[in-house]
Image (cartoon, helix red, strand yellow):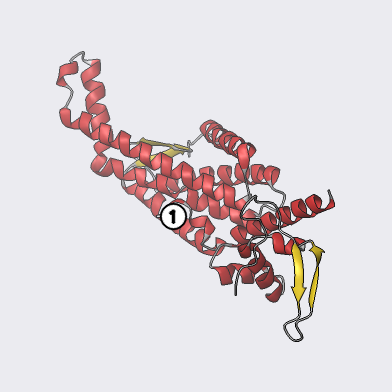
Amino acid sequence: MKKWINPFEKYSESRLISFGLAFYVIGSLMAYFFHTRFDNFLHMVAVETIEIHQPFIDNLIILVCLFIVFFVFGKLVYQKTRAVDILALVLTGNAPFYLMSLSNINDLSLKSTDAILTAMESGAATDISGFALAYLSIVGIVSIAVLIWNIALLYNGFKTAANAKGAKAVLLFIIAIILSITITYFIPNTY
Amino acid sequence: MKKLPVVCPSCESELQVSSLACAHCDTVISGSFGLPVMLRLSQEEQDFILDFVLSGGSLKAMAKQMDKSYPTVRNFLDQIIENLNRLKNEKMD
């Protein structure tokens, strides 16, 4: 169980980076095949059409932003923080979120959302499909679990890479997460 | 090997050496001797220092030996340094 929450304690940076790169490629391909885009950090949107290069660039932008933010914050906490450990942290730490693409298999998320929006717009709330509601509720619950897993991985990785301890480390980690979300939110993804 | 107790089990104060004996001729020296700072570290920390020196001071070799990642081992070494500094300062006070 521990290796799923904190692989950084045991596995070498080279192994984590190899796994992380594999997750990046698989995650981007999943996003392409299941019509989803990671338009900013910890955010995914189902789309009707997608080009093969888009999920790769989406994920690359997020990883680069995370790397810069966590490296700067890591250095603030601990001078001996190594870039290679931060690279292992962002590549591995962001991997669980790629699983969210699975929620749009066969465009299920997109179709369910559209069905609910159409029913709401026509004023016939009672026509909302029970399946669409149930499906989106399950996706919502799973999303929260994946989000918690993702944050736990990033925090454990940050703690190990930057020898972070105490309240200052927690505070800097929270600021790093918020900053990463904000930066990736403002980067246009019109490519 | 038996573990050397460094803290009093009754009041948790630091223990001192009160006698030393020669196993060869049975000479006994009595007195009050403080424990070296190194001996006041935990057994795990003492073992780490010994292995670290024997590995030629290589954290990479230590990581391999302990089956841990490099930053985990480096953080542990930093914790030992912190503890040694604290114990050293306590001794000076």
Residue B34 appears left or right of A85: right
Residue drawn at 24 percent across, 43 percent down = A106
Residue A118 position within the rendered picture, expressed as x and y whole percent measured from the top left:
23, 21
Q: Image height check: is B23 above or below A148?
A: below
Amino acid residing under circle 1: Lys
Q: Is residue B34 above or below residue B53?
A: above
Residue at (68, 71) in percent of width and height: B50
Give the chain letter at badge 1: A
Label 1 SS: helix
What residue is disc 1 on?
A: A2
Is B82 on the left or on the right of A140, as rendered? right
Camera-side residue of B12 and B29: B29
- Residue at the limit of the structure toward the top, as seen here: A123
State the residue in front, B48 or B7: B7
Residue A166 placement (x, y as % from top left): 62, 40
Q: Residue at image x 69%, y 51%?
A: B13
Q: Say whether residue A60 is visible.
A: no
Q: Residue at x 70, y 60 (%)?
A: B40
Whether residue B11 appears in this view of the structure is yes
Residue farthest along the right direction in this orientation: B92
Q: How many neighbours does mark 1 have within 10 angstroms: few (below 14), some (14-19), or many (20 or more)? A: few
